């Protein structure tokens, strides 16, 4: 464990924003993490995972603690089910591929999502009809103040749409150290109706898909729509898809009958934020090196030298345009610092 000073965080955030950390420590064990916490006030620390769901708008004056805990272990296995624990610093997509290689089902729809395992429950990440809560068994988190490890069950996490207890009541109080997933073996249940997975499989002539087929479909679809952060800085979906009442939808459909939506319950629907941004004429819009992606309007991108403030300014302009046109507030999915 080494303490570095004046470290650039450009390679530690998927937007590729070049800000500096006053101090930087990468921890590889829970004991190292405890040592850092023992020697620092919690208010002086900035916890960094995969850097995939954040926008850095200024240099970080706090000590940046990079969670680099590694390891994947099978906790329990039956004929039909398996519990797999992954440490917080494991790359999310590589972990998904590990599960697919071992024919463990449940995560295939979440292929190619950027970031690390430890941050997945915080956001209740989801894609193509599947969310973390659907396969979540438990996670372990370290209390920043007491240095005690605590288990959080599915109920404890209070998952919602891109929400969890770690973004609300317990925000800033815990660091997730590992996550255990409840996956299937052999007798998999597939979710192919969301997005264009079904049509992709049909085009490939796959009538009885396996989990690898679905993962390949998701990867291909994502690559066709979403930029690779290694080539074009971005944080995936920048905005949440707004949830509105059916009454509001009906009002809007009088003007925009083609407006897509997904039913949430008897009273509410979810409208794709990307469609709203596109309809507002902002797909492909650019201000300097900050832009709205030309293929997926839900994604804001850094074309090279955009600052965090540039991206933030653009995001606010997008929010204003969408609200002026539709009367709908779209909220950031990313954390802004």
Image: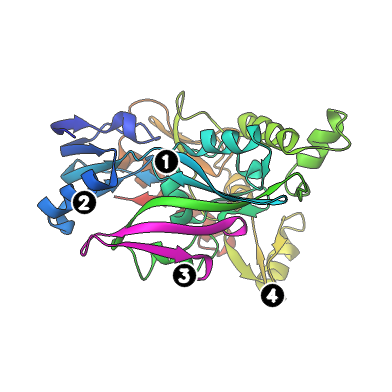
Between 8 and 249, the residue placed more toward the observer is: 8
* Mark 2 Cα shell of 10 Å, populated few (<14), some (14-19), many (≥20): some
Label 3 or label 2, whichever lies nearer to me, is 2
Along the polypeptide, which appears first: circle 1 or circle 4? 1
Give me the C-alpha separation between circle 3 and circle 4. 33 Å
Q: Mark 4 points at which residue?
A: 247
The x, y position of residue 72, in whole percent, is 48, 40
Label 3: element kind: helix
The x, y position of residue 329, in whole percent, is 50, 62
Q: Name the residue under label 2.
A: 34
Q: Name the residue under label 1.
A: 52
Along the polypeptide, which appears first: circle 1 or circle 3? 1
Label 1 or label 3, whichever lies nearer to me, is 3
Residue 63: which numbered mark, if any?
Answer: none
Displayed quadrant of residue 102? top right
* Mark 3 Cα shell of 10 Å, populated few (<14), some (14-19), many (≥20): few
Label 2: element kind: helix
Determine whether label 2 and label 1 are within 8 Å by CB: no
The x, y position of residue 332, in whole percent, is 45, 54
Along the polypeptide, which appears first: circle 2 or circle 4? 2
* Mark 4 Cα shell of 10 Å, populated few (<14), some (14-19), many (≥20): few
Which region of the structure is painted magenta? 133-156
Label 2 or label 1, whichever lies nearer to me, is 2
Along the polypeptide, which appears first: circle 3 or circle 4? 3
């Amino acid at each position: 464990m080494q303490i570095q000073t004046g470290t650039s965080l450009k390679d530690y955030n998927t937007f590729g924003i070049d800000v500096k950390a006053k101090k930087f420590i990468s921890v590889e064990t829970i004991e190292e993490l405890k040592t850092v916490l023992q020697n620092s006030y919690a208010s002086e620390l900035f916890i960094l995972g995969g850097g995939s769901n954040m926008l850095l708008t200024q240099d970080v004056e706090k000590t940046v603690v990079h969670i680099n805990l590694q390891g994947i272990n099978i906790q329990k296995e039956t004929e039909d089910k398996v519990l797999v624990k992954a440490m917080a610093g494991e790359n999310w997509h590589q972990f998904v591929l590990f599960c697919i290689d071992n024919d463990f089902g449940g995560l295939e729809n979440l292929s190619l999502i950027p970031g690390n395992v430890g941050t997945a429950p915080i956001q209740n990440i989801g894609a193509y009809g599947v969310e973390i809560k659907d396969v979540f068994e438990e996670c372990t988190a370290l209390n920043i103040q007491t240095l005690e490890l605590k288990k959080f069950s599915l109920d404890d996490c209070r998952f919602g749409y891109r929400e969890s207890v770690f973004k609300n009541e317990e925000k800033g109080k815990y660091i997730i150290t590992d996550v255990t997933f409840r996956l299937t073996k052999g007798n998999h249940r597939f979710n192919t109706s969301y997005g264009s997975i079904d049509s992709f499989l049909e085009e490939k002539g796959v009538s009885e898909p396996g989990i690898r087929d679905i993962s390949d479909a998701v990867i291909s679809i994502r690559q066709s729509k979403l930029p690779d952060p290694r080539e074009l800085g971005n944080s995936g979906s920048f905005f949440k898809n707004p949830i509105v009442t059916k009454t509001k939808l009906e009002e809007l459909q009088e003007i925009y009958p083609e407006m897509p939506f997904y039913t949430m319950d008897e009273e509410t629907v979810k409208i794709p934020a990307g469609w709203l941004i596109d309809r507002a004429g902002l797909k492909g819009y650019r201000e300097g090196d900050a832009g709205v992606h030309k293929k997926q309007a839900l994604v804001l991108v850094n074309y090279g030298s955009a600052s965090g403030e540039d991206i933030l300014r653009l995001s606010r302009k997008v929010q204003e345009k969408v609200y002026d046109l539709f009367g709908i507030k779209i909220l950031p999915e990313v954390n802004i610092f």
